[in-house]
Image (cartoon, coloured by chain):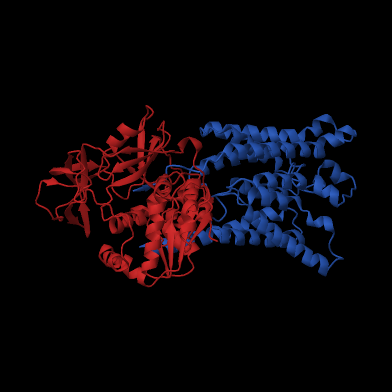
Chain colours: A blue, B red
Amino acid sequence: MMKTWVHLSYDSKRTKKILLFFLFLLFGYGFYKNGLSYFFFKMMSFSDALKPLWFVLIGIFCSAVSFLLFRKKDFYSLLIEGILVGLLPPPSFPLHWFFIYTFFFLLLARFWERKTSLIPMMLFYKVGLIGFTSLFQIGLQNVIEQTTPYYYGTIDVVLGRGLGGVGTTSIFLVVLLFGFLGSDFYYKKEISISAFFSYTFLFFLFFFLHPESYLLQDYFNPSFFFTIVLFLPRNASSPATKMAGLFYGVGVGILSYFLIHCFSIQEGAYLSLFLIYFLFLLLHFLWLLRQKKNVK
Amino acid sequence: MKKAVSILCPEKWKVNRQVKEFLTPDFVYLPISKEAKMLTKKRNVYKGDALYEYQKKTYYSPISGKIEKIVSLKQGEKENYFLKILNDFQENDHYQGVEHTTVMLTNDLKERIRNYHHHFFEDLKNCDTLVLFGLEKEPFLASQSILQEHHMDEICLFLDTLASCYHIDHIFLYFQENDQESIEAAEKILNVYPKMQMILLPPYVPYGNRSFFRQTFLSHDRAFLLSSYEVFDAFYELIKLRKKDFLYLTITGDSVKNPQVVKVKIGTVLEDVIKHCVSCKKNKMTILKNGLLAGEVVEENLVLTEDVHGIFLMKTKEIKEEKCIFCGKCNAVCPVGCNPYKMVQTKGKFHDSRCISCGLCSYVCPSHISILEKGDEK
């Protein structure tokens, strides 16, 4: 019987370290943008300025509890999950609700993970947060932005002044992270690239057709870039074949464009990925059913 | 150009180019079964004597000596039968003192080819190009390269004779770019043969796979493809008028202190070769035959037949198969465009006929799923 004895050495720790490093940077920027910068200008008290830090600490705590309860031993994954969870809520999200939601969600996620790796838990978590924010009408601005008139230019938005989660707004860092992750053999960069190009194509098509309705900084939607780099190419929830992957990416890019720019849903990229994910999951099961029938 | 992957042989696994010889085993074993038709009744045989016919193939004695008996050897879960011959170390054969190294008369050679292999003769009639396929199947193997280095003059002589016989105008010799020894050996004599042209390919997997090579590099059907092994066998039989009784064997792996190419008698038991030719580290070993990407796990009592080119002595390790993470890399690297992922999803029930069993899908799988094995089960 044929056997493969040698395997391509894959250093998953390296990828996790890169991810962790950039999550720290994103957190650092989020902490500065939503807390420290206002504290330095004495617009915010020190305890209020610490809110982004609390998000991350709660995230790590909840993740650690769930890891301990389900005896999962992976320190890097724990930290990645904890920090990522802390970066996703809008800056003005109430801390107590965040704690309750995160704690129970992660316990449920850990339980569910034992059954399947197909479910992209972080995406589900984020969509839950979006549900919360729209239910309680929590805006994406931080406390100061909600009360003070402001204007951010294109460069500001690229650097991270846009609207989104606590630490998900720095497009510059996210693109830099893509540069590093893209060198990983197992990272499905073609999906991200196809989503990026389809979104860009649609935006600039309408931008040139109706220049009066669009601003260039609208193009730089932080949640879109964050989604296509961190959530979209996840192995377990994206198609395995290249062609299907390209369609998946294009689907997310197109739907994101319409949700963000036609329906004015700032975090529409997460929702579009959520919908496209279910569509492809359905198609995958139908394909599997057909294959099994054919084999019989 | 179809997809291919660059895999390099680790420096410590590279073989010593000095060939070690082990041509005096006490016994040799030839595979046999009840259906075999005996061609001789003598107990004492000479080297090159036809012994029996089995599965449309005639088996010849690689040594001179005495036929002992038919023995059974348990290899894996199977029990195989072998004809055991005791070596008298005389190396007697019927051709002693006669060396046929000069080129045969054209008609004479044609007649021999007609009797040699049916497909050989039929295909040669319609072809206009001869192609020497001198690429190793995997980067860890060196037997073919050694054969080319030591016998390039015979290989070229045979190809040229064949081309003259059948009025073939072009002969292409394909080697790997990093196979310096074969290239140098060919360069030395190519000026003698104006019809021959050397083509170098990068050492990618699966360029050394015959069907992949044919599909990718040979644009027309009128090219007659021969590996160096085949040319050398045919040279022995058709020009030297003897049966080739030895083979070159690469012995390497992480359990071998001195990786080596060994010239051994066909029918020798692997255990004897290991004992005499290489020194091994003291750890539990797993033995693989003919490759690490698409090899076969064998035991020490393996009998070396013509199709064995490499033996890998590897530290025994447990390859833990994990769940598929749907990364799709098996699909992305497949050089012939089949869907190995489909094979995993249907738990091996689906097998794509295009699969060339190169093992690249299993090689890149981060979950270490033995996709190749699943396909093979079918």
Residue A286 visible in the displayed image: no
Residue B376 visible in the displayed image: yes
| Position of B48 relative to B120 (above/below) | above
Tell me: A88 left or right of A187: right
Tell me: B319 left or right of B95: right
- Return the residue nearer the eye: B115 or B317: B115
Give percent across and percent down for residue A281. 54, 57
Q: Say which quadrant the C terminus of chain A sits in.
A: bottom left
- Return the residue nearer the eye: A68 or B228: B228
* Residue under the point 85% across and 41% down: A144
Give percent across and percent down for residue B125. 35, 71
Give percent across and percent down for residue B159. 39, 60
**What is the count of numbered marks?**
0
| Position of B207 relative to B25 (above/below) | below
Image quadrant assignment for residue B265: top left
Give percent across and percent down for residue B348. 39, 54
